[in-house]
C-alpha cells in the first residue's frame, strides 16, 4: 500500500502533510525524517488518520520489525459472558437472515408462478375467446 513505507507517500503532496503552513514546512524530506524518527507506531497512527478522513485506502501496513504475542485469556467471567452473549446474538441474526432469505426465494418463486399464470389466456380471470 502507499503507506507501507513512508517514502511511498512522496507523490501525495496534495494531502497537505508537508510544505508551507504545515508541521513540515521544508518539504517531504522533513516529513519523511520525522516519521522515520518516530518509528513504525507513528506510521501506523498516521495511516489510520489518513484512512479515517478518507484521504487514502490502506489495507495493511508492513509488519517488519513488529513484535506481538497472542494471548488467549479472558479477564473475568463478566467479559466472557458479554462475549458469549454477543456471539450468540450474531449466530441468531445469521440464522434469522438465512431464514428470511429462504422465505424471499419462495415468495419470488410464487410471484413468478403468478406472473406466468397471468400471461396465459384466461389468466387474468377473463375467459379466453
Image: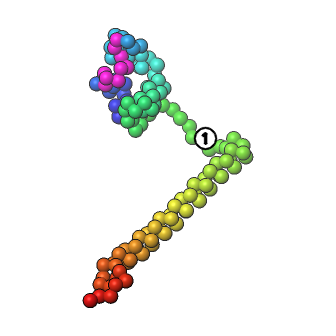
Q: Which residue, given by chain and number where applicable, does mark 1 sit on?
A: 71
Q: Is residue 64 visible?
A: no
Q: Look at the image and say whether residue 13 sits in the magenta stretch.
A: yes
Nearer the observer, 38 or 67: 38
Nearer the observer, 117 or 17: 117
SS type, badge 1: loop
Residue at (37, 20) in percent of width and height: 17
Counting from the top left corner in percent of width and height, residue 54 is at 40, 33
Q: Is residue 93 above or below residue 14?
A: below
Residue at (51, 61) in percent of width and height: 97
Give the total of numbered labels. Answer: 1
Residue at (53, 35) in percent of width and height: 68
Counting from the top left corner in percent of width and height, residue 29 is at 33, 15
Chief secondary structure of the magenta portion: loop
Counting from the top left corner in percent of width and height, residue 76 is at 72, 43
Tell me which corner region of the image, top left, top right, bottom left or bottom right, holds residue 28. top left
Quadrant containing the N terminus in the rendered view: top left
Residue at (62, 51) in percent of width and height: 86
Q: Is residue 65 above or below residue 114?
A: above
Q: Look at the image and say whether residue 71 sits in the magenta stretch.
A: no
Tell me which corner region of the image, top left, top right, bottom left or bottom right, holds residue 59. top left
Quadrant containing the C terminus in the rendered view: bottom left
Magenta residues span: 12-20
Q: Report crowding for label 1: few under 14, some 14 to 19, many 20 or more residues within 10 A (C-alpha).
A: few
The colour scheme used here is rainbow
Say left or right for 64 vs 116: right
Q: Is residue 16 above or below residue 109?
A: above
Nearer the observer, 26 or 61: 26
Amino acid at each position: 500500500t502507499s503507506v507501507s513505507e513512508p517514502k511511498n507517500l512522496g507523490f501525495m503532496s496534495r494531502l497537505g502533510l508537508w510544505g508551507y503552513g504545515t508541521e513540515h514546512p521544508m518539504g517531504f524530506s522533513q516529513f519523511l525524517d520525522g516519521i522515520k524518527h518516530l518509528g513504525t507506531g507513528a506510521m501506523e497512527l498516521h495511516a489510520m488518520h489518513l484512512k479515517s478522513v478518507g484521504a487514502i485506502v490502506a489495507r495493511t501496513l508492513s509488519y517488519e520489525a513488529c513484535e506481538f504475542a497472542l494471548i488467549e485469556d479472558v479477564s473475568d467471567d463478566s467479559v466472557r459472558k458479554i462475549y458469549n452473549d454477543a456471539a450468540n446474538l450474531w449466530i441468531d441474526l445469521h440464522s434469522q437472515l438465512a431464514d428470511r432469505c429462504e422465505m424471499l426465494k419462495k415468495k419470488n418463486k410464487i410471484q413468478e408462478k403468478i406472473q406466468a399464470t397471468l400471461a396465459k389466456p384466461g389468466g387474468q380471470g377473463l375467459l379466453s375467446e
